[in-house]
Image (tube, rainbow, N blue to C red):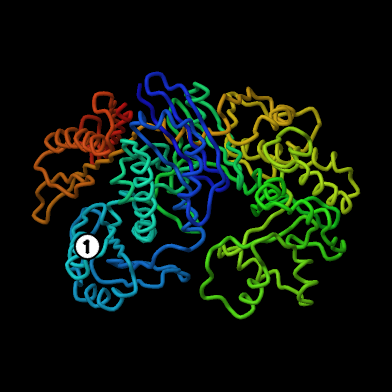
Amino acid sequence: MQYSMGIDAGGTYTDSIIIRDSDGKVMDSNKALTTYPDLLEGIRNSINGLNQKYLKDIKMVSVSTTLATNTILEKNGYPVGLILVGDYEIPEKMHVEFHTVVKGGHDHHGAELVSLDMEAVEAFVSKVKDRVSAFAVSSYFSIRNPAHELAVKTRIQELTGMPVVCGHELSLDLGAYERGTTAYLNAQLIPIASQFIRSIQEEISRRGMNSRLLMLKCDGSVVGINEALEKPIESIFSGPAASLVGASHLSGLETCAVIDVGGTSTDVSMLENGLPELCADGAVVGGWQTKVKAIRMETSAMGGDSHVWVRNMKINIGPRRVIPLCVAAVKYPGFLEVLRKGRIPGAMRLDENVQPTKFFVKTGVEPSDLGKFETELFEKIGNFPASLNDIFWETKKTLSPGLLDSLIRKRLIQAIGFTPTDALHVLGEYTAWDGEASIVGAKLLERYTQTDHIELCKQIKQDVARNMALNLVSFIQKDVLSSEIEKILLSDRFTQFRMKIPVVLIGGPVVAYARELKQILDADIRIPEYAEVGNAVGAVVGKGIKRIEILIKSTYSKDKKRLVLLFSPQGRETFGSYPEAFEHAETLGRKLVMEYMTEAGLDKGQVQIEVSKKDVSLSEAGAIPVETKLVFVGVGMPKI
């Protein structure tokens, strides 16, 4: 008997699951807390909780992770030199330390506009090579002719031997600057992805598992490990993609909406006929507009571990994630007594960081480049949770919230606080951790809201369910303002939204929110078995999907001779006639799809390729099109 393993390293939990290859049955699953900054420890803990008898027969391991997303959001990527070739419009606030613009580039037919200034490239490389770990290059209209990008790449590798990422290797969409951004971010991630993947390979080998390793992309498809190493940028948002694929597998639905309630956020996406909808303009992450094809989703910073805090007798949820009180009481023995005896701040002093239930603890990450006041505050926080009130009474110094926020962003300290997960513990609807700590926290908060702690927790639960509904309807009705949708959701005047497709809930204790969600929405809401580890399921059952675009354009040479140009991922080719170009395109598109499937380790015998064709004509029907766009979509399954 053979099995496959899926692993999802999320923001709060690292989930793992074992699936039997013969029929897709889930054999075992486990959850462990995600560990920062080294995700490997959390992955190891998650695998340790599985039935070890299956490990020797696992032939494939597939992983999804937030590593790429978090690295970009936290601005922790490796330094990269960015070279833009052509007449670029550079944004005023371009947050790239090492970059240059040199002469060169092509037009929309792939003809050279300006000769490449290789001397300028060499001068820039010589200047920054000792300060960067990789280079990225994007040339104007490289999607029509990548010659200048390839020339720059070859020369940099000759001079430095460092990795070089080209824009055309990652995207064939228009938008030279955005392709440059995508290449730049990808180059930042290559050393990090390499370390992460090598660590997993070593862990698999250490356990004696003879398994092939795959990684889930943010469009819901899986890739071979070689491509994952070359294009780690494509793993951004792979977590939501995993939840979508996992929900479909567990529910048996090819068309459905999916609500994934994680620790940090709630994500909504949709699957139609087995395929997800993709962002038309590419994924946006950390303020960067990329050309990465990711699933379209509606997301909000309200999850199971979002901070619940009080000010002016009003309950606020999020946007920041904290360690729930119930988890902290298990992780830090003695914390429950500290919580019971903690100093209570005055109502006028309350803000997000000054709460009777808010505590701080070091993460274990070694600090670097801290300012004087940051250092002073960091030294006052220890390896056991302490509140700002405790720190104030010890030092007699008023602490700046800005300094605290800075230490949190740098992952030097973690916050602990009351969360929706604690509310569920108080209500007895989720009991995985220390519910007594949750009850103590709820009773502390009730003092500031004049609301019984049970009713307070019911209200928190209702707010989370309403946020799930708002995300869902906003996703489906993408042209309607969220504020208008919220007015209807908050109203009880004989109206209710009705969903025409099933809604699948994925993530931790989502079953606790089903009743409230049904009261808000008229929907067929389903919670499949193993919903709590749906992301790990998605990581292992993802299909191999490859999309190849080929463009054929009719034009004329300088001497008025008719030419047919073909643009593909391999570059520009010229043909004497349209039929000749079209026949070559059909053969090439299928060949590139099958080469990808082979490289990814997918089963070539199960690959299905669909081809769509779009013509642009300026004369009567029957004339040769001015432009033809062919899109080849191949769908395959991992070899089992």
Where's residue 416, x and y in %? 69, 55
Q: Which residue lies furthest to the top in this view?
A: 23
Along the line of sight, the residue nearer the viewer: 9 or 310: 9
Quickly name the residue at label 1: 153
The quadrant holding residue 477 is: top right
Number of marks in the rendered image: 1
Element marked by disc 1:
helix
Up the image or down, 153 lies above or below 509; here it is below
Q: Quadrant of residue 154?
A: bottom left
The residue lying toward the viewer, choosing from 79 and 171, is 79
Query: Is 184 drawn above or below residue 274 in the view shown?
Result: below
Q: In which quarter of the image is the C terminus?
A: top left
Above or below 294: residue 338: below
What residue is shown at x 74% (from left), y 28% (from top)?
Answer: 519
Q: Residues within 10 Å of mark 1 (few under 14, many from 20)?
A: some
Horizontally, residue 377 falls left or right of residue 90, namely: right
Specify the quadrant of the image occupied by residue 6: top left
Kindly give the residue lying farthest to the right in the view shown: 450
Front residue of 518/639: it is: 639
Q: Residue at x 30, y 61 (%)?
A: 138
Where residue 459 appears, as percent x and y from the top left, is: 80, 40
Seen in the image, is 136 located left or right of residue 533?
left
Left or right for 366, reference 404: left
Residue kind at label 1, given as amino acid type: Lys
Q: Position of residue 207 (x, y in %)?
A: 37, 40
Residue at 83% across, 51% down: 445
Which part of the image, by quadrant, shows the N terminus? top left
